[in-house]
Image (cartoon, rainbow, N blue to C red):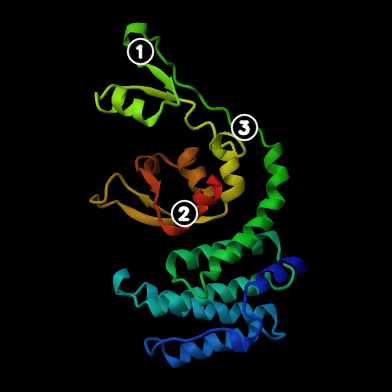
Amino acid sequence: MAVLWSKLSAVLPPNEEEFPLQFSDKVESSVVSVLQQSRRQLYSDATSTDRTLTAQIILDLSWEKLNTGTWRDVDKEWRRVYSYGCLFKVAALCREHPSADEILQGIRTCDMGLLMGAAIMDNVLQVLVQILLNIKIYRIKAKFLELPCLKTERPRVPVIKDEQAVPRIKCPSLESFKSDYLLPLRPVILEATADHWPAFNEHPWSVEYLRSVAGCRTVPVEVGSRYTDEEWSQTLLTVNEFIDQYVLNRVSASSLSQFPFLTLYECLFLILFSLWV
């Protein structure tokens, strides 16, 4: 996996001196010292175990700060510290000969930094996760092509009388749509207006396709029927876990009584946008 590390290291500063680590006095000097140690290990012959251990210390220290008090009161400097910890951990995981599980850990670590941390070094975590995803997607692409599509039951549609049917039109002009349907408030079914979308052509959307391109991504999920419910909560799941637990209904009856949905954080937007194009 020397090729992988060469791609990852190419987006990092070429040496320790050019690697930025500036923090305000909100971050204790002892924590900055650990960050500097991790930076030295990144550019030295330190073992993978040592790199991982130091990065985890940074993550544990900053995670405690992120979960003290309310989120709005968390200083942005500590979110930056957390992001640096994620960066150092990804580097430790993928420096030598990472296994498939270690690549998955690297992807999850980047996602956690994107969700819980703050942008550092021109949003380097987003660049790193895309490199890791390209490796992961390449590995499972052949397997995805061999997977049979899941069969879904189609609901029975009653026969509609012609006089009650909603009219159908194809690709109307904006002017005609406005004058004939929008202003008069007449219902209409638009046909062939989205045929050019990649989701209907180059990348047909299905559970299998979503698994192949985003199954390993970590996303925020809100569970509950409404924000005011006592049972309402937030959690972090991979897209695969969300599909298994809530899309394919592989959960207990008590869990099914809730209504989970993916929340539109920046990380999820970037995932879906990359699928769209």
Q: Secondary structure at mark 3?
A: loop
The answer to whether 141 appears left or right of 235 in the picture is right
- Res 149 label: 3
Relative to 11, say whether 195 is above or below: above
User: Quarter of the image holding residue 234?
Assistant: bottom left
Identify the residue at horizontal 56%, vertical 44% (top origin). 210
Q: Which residue is mark 2?
A: 268
Relative to 82, say whether 182 is above or below: above
Q: Earlier in the sequence, mark 3 or mark 2?
A: 3
Q: Which residue is mark 1?
A: 165
The answer to whether 72 appears left or right of 12 in the picture is left
What crowding class fits label 3: few (fewer than 14 Cα within 10 Å), some (14-19), or many (20 or more)?
Answer: few
What crowding class fits label 2: few (fewer than 14 Cα within 10 Å), some (14-19), or many (20 or more)?
Answer: many
Identify the residue at horizontal 60%, vertical 60% (top origin). 130
Spatial separation of the CA atoms under disc 1 and disc 2: 38 Å
Closer to viewer: mark 3 or mark 1: 1
The answer to whether 91 appears left or right of 119 in the picture is right
Q: Secondary structure at mark 2?
A: helix
